[in-house]
Every structure is written in C-alpha cells, then in structure tokens.
Image (cartoon, helix red, strand yellow):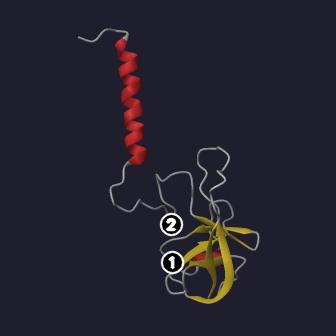
Amino acid sequence: MNHPRQLPATIAMACLLLSMTACGEESGEEPESDAGGRNKGSGSCALQFTYEGRTYKDVANLRFTATSKLGDATQAPCNDTGEEPGSGEQLKKESAYRISGVSPAVAIAVGENAKTAKLFAVYSGSKLPEEVEQLG
C-alpha cells in the first residue's frame, strides 16, 4: 500500500525516467521532418552552417545540382544546454558548393563532395527563399 507522502516522489521519479528515455532513445528510425525538411521532435540544435557571414539551415526533399566548390562552411558545436562551450570543442568545416541557378547568398550545398552534398538555405523566419522553393 502506498502512503500519501510517497505519491509525489513516485510521480516525480516516473517523469524523470520518462524524460531520460525520450531523450536517450535511439530507435534507428529517421525522425519525421516538417515541410522545410527540419526534424520534428529533435533536439534544439538544428543542422546549420555559416558561410561568408550568413547562416544556412538544412533543407530536405528538393532536387538540386551542386556545381563548383565555393570554399569552407563552418558548423559550430551544438550547445543545447546553455552552458559555455568546452575548450575541447572544435568548429567543423565542410566544403561548400554552388547550386545551379541559385545565388550562394540564398543557398549552398555542403558536404565532402558535390555529389553527396546536402542543401542548406538562408531562411527569412521559417520561410524558404523563393529561389529555393522553385527547386522542388
């Protein structure tokens, strides 16, 4: 039989275990994406790169052709805890590529090579630039 004083502690422990399970679970399935290609239910760190002072966010499900290499795009380490980054964290650099028919000021492709690079765009709020929407 549970005592009335044990109930709040039991509920708190159940909530803690549930939140730990939700954050640490790896099912092997891809997270569901919203219309802009961003993962729903993922952590607060979105996949973003910076190139020439602009921040680009990932875009999914659009066809594009990556062409010539522009230089390096930089991905800062994820800091979803609000704490100061540790001294051991490094900036990740990847190659940035021009996208056929789109200005690099609007969108770039980022990856090891032009064939495997992924699409990234500068957003205005949560809206994709019109040039990028026309790719789909």
The local crowd at label 1, few if under 14, some if 14 to 19, many if 20 or more residues have their Cα within 10 Å, is some
Q: 112 or 14: which is nearer to us? A: 112
Image position of 73 with respect to 25: above or below? below
Amino acid type assigned to the residue bearing label 1 in the image: Leu
Q: For residue 128, what is the image quadrant?
A: bottom right
Question: Quick check: marks 1 and 2 in contact, CB under 8 Å?
Answer: yes
Checking the image for residue 18, the label placed there is none
User: In percent of the image, x 41 and y 60: which residue is there?
Assistant: 32
User: In percent of the image, x 67 and y 53: which residue is there?
Assistant: 87
Q: For residue 33, what is the image quadrant?
A: bottom left
Q: 119 or 101: which is nearer to us? A: 119
Amino acid type assigned to the residue bearing label 2 in the image: Gly
Mark 1 / mark 2, whichever is N-terminal: 2
The N terminus: image quadrant: top left
Residue 14: % across, % down: 36, 29
Task: Give the residue number, with chain letter if any, for mark 1.
Answer: 62
Q: Secondary structure at mark 2?
A: loop
Task: Give the residue number, with chain letter if any, for mark 2.
Answer: 37
Image position of 50 with respect to 114: above or below? above
